[in-house]
Amino acid sequence: MTPRTVVLADLSSWEAWLHLAGALRREGFDVVRFTRADLGRTQRVLVGMERLVFTQTHPVLRFAGADVDVSPLFAWLDRSADVQMVDAIGAVLTGTGQWDASRRLHRVHVPGIAETAIYDKWIYTQLAAEAGVTVPNSRELTDALPAGQWVLKGRVGSGGDRVRLVSSNQEVQQALRDWDTSASQSFIQSKVGGDLWNVGGVAHEGEVLVAAAYRAFSAPDDPEGPPVDIQIEPKPDQIEATRRFVAALGYSGPFAIDFLDDGVAHLLDFNPRFFGTWAAMQSAGVDLLGAYLSILGRPWTPSTTVIDAARIPSSVTGQDSLGAAWRRGRVLSRRLEPTVGARASAVMRLQALANGRSRRDPGPSVAIAYSEPWLAALQWGGALRHAGVHVARYAVAPLSRLQSLRQAGEGLCFDESHLVLRDFETHIEVHDPAPGHGPRGCGGRAPRRADDRAGPGRHRTHQRMAGQPAPAPCPTERG
């Protein structure tokens, strides 16, 4: 009997996982999430809210040196219908003996090609070229960098991670130091011009079941940011290149491929998992979910009704005020609810508020302290943030899971939350927060942890970047 559990493994909150968990729960699957143990404050709030959509959530993953310790996933391999994972996890897990023994979960079905190949940019780029797919001129790193400007890429990475334009050996060495990696784990590609395109689809044992090409559009004031809209258009040459590449791997599962098209489509990156815009494509008639479920044993009749050339909202991010963010969340949740279900739709609306913070220069700071649930505090917090004021909340530490969930939701109305009050019958005690974590007017706002803003799924290619990669977006801004 086919298992009814799907495992999703990540290192941060991600819209793609939220949408997928909601969709699979509607189809009768249990969805178990594994994420990192050392989440930052923003991540804890977002992941806490998303628990409502997942069957189980296990924040237990940790880094062991440069790699993720994937051992907590081993016990779930035999009892899962599938494991969807971000690249940093997949590159490690697919190289273990436990994964090798779980043949039902395998992605690659061509003899002689390792499962880890789909996460190794150098290997799959060579396989693409051998299959007749156009790729940028790619070379291993040598002692002397060839003349001109090149794109330095790490062999494993996603979302613009470990991608940098270089034109000298000094720049190469600096990048390797910044990434804490070696020349053997990196390579260079020629810089290619043209327009960025993506092809998203689902394949089974080397056959593309469904696929469509689309362009992704970022927010006007964040051109290097994650996609907030997509537009599906016919691109037969990219679809053909996709078919050749997928067949060369014998690949099974959902995928997204990045192309740069200057009249000829150059394959840049392959993402062997569900991707940030999949639910938007589903809402436009590209039945990715149906094709994926067919791999898991469900009957499926392909759909041919696809909306072409229309701008389709794909993310709640990219809004510059709480009002605009709320409206965006409402529009997107209504569009995606038939696919992702009511729970994910409700969380989407709340998370829209978290991404609607004003992008104006910092304004004054206000602290609001209360010990009981107080609607006025939420209203004031939201209104002040909308006006550009930095708002810190001081409240009672939760005593139950229900209180934790409630306070996680309330926290979206504030820039900072400090659960430092202790409520006794006769008085309230205040425990000072850690130094540097008060509002800006009381000692300075602490910087966000790196993992508050990191995560998978940003389809930014190396040719669009000038020099170093831009900082990663808010974790729900997955493209």
Image (cartoon, rainbow, N blue to C red):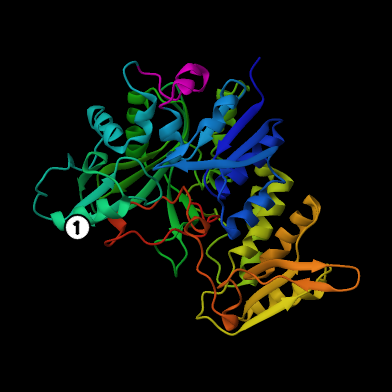
Magenta segment: 95-110
Left or right position of 75 against 267:
right
Residue 32 vertical position relative to residue 383 in the rendered view, above or below: above
| Residue receiving disc 1 | 171
User: Does residue 157 show up?
Assistant: yes
User: Does residue 167 show up?
Assistant: no
Other-residue count near label 1 (Cα within 10 Å), few / some / many at <14 / 14–19 / ≥20: some
Residue 284 vertical position relative to residue 115 in the rendered view, above or below: below
Q: Position of residue 166 (x, y in %)?
A: 20, 56
Left or right position of 417 against 453:
right
Image quarter where the N terminus lies is top right
Type of amino acid under label 1: Glu
Q: Position of residue 275 (x, y in %)?
A: 49, 43
* Front one among 300 and 381: 381
Q: Give the total number of marks visible in the rendering.
A: 1
Residue drawn at 39 percent across, 22 percent down: 250
